[in-house]
Image (tube, rainbow, N blue to C red):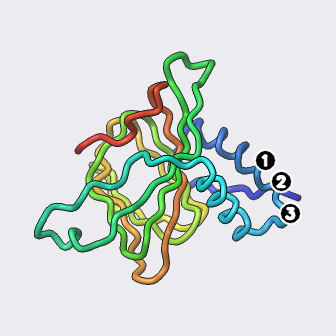
Amino acid sequence: MKAARLPHRNQVGAGVAALSVMLAAGWALMPHGSKQDAVQWLDDVCSAVSRPMFSSAPAPAGSGEAARPATSTKVISCEALPHVPGKSVTTVIVDFPPLAFSPAHRHPGSVTAIILGGTIRSQLGGGPVGTYKTGETFFEPPGTLHVFAENPDPVKPAKLVAVFVADENCGPLLLPP
């Protein structure tokens, strides 16, 4: 079975290589190689080893975003990087229900996001709003203001995997704006 190759939309970090190896290994172990099977496999892995990491902070009261659903997250893994003392790679699944909204925040380390399904709109401080679809990626340098992320679809959920390269203690991965 041939492993899927995800197209790169923007600059991506070294974490994508590690994630690709993990996904390819899991993909190879699946009895069926469809995209739907891969997403189900990721859900099963998350259910087996998940622990809460962070959820999006509430939107400001009185804003249109306050009535929108929040994202939810599941940590898949956190591993020390033996060749980079003091750093680790943490892999997280982020679920966006229909119309979910994640307000402004920052991350202490580098983050590469890979869209697993649906559509995500996202904006980093100083940059344009980007719209990302299944198989596309975006990169967040450490400390960059992530102005917002959302699922603009009123019916279909969206999902991404985020690969963080941050401090060895695996957290915190979410910082206030």
Element marked by disc 3: loop
Q: Position of residue 52 (x, y in %)?
A: 44, 48
Mark 3, other Cα within 10 Å: few <14 / some 14–19 / many ≥20: few
Q: Which amino acid, by three-letter code, is at mark 1?
A: Ala
Q: Which residue is mark 2?
A: 28
Q: Nearer the viewer, mark 3 or mark 2?
A: 3
Q: Is residue 3 above or below residue 154?
A: above
| Residue located at (59% from left, 36% from top) | 14
Compare residues 129 and 68 and report the one nearer the observer.
68
Q: Which residue is mark 1?
A: 25
Mark 2, other Cα within 10 Å: few <14 / some 14–19 / many ≥20: some
* Residue sitting at the far bottom: 155
Q: CA distance from mark 3 to mark 1?
A: 12 Å
Q: Which mark is residue 31?
A: 3
Q: CA distance from mark 1 to mark 2?
A: 5 Å
Q: Which amino acid, by three-letter code, is at mark 3?
A: Pro
Q: Is residue 91 above or below residue 67?
A: above
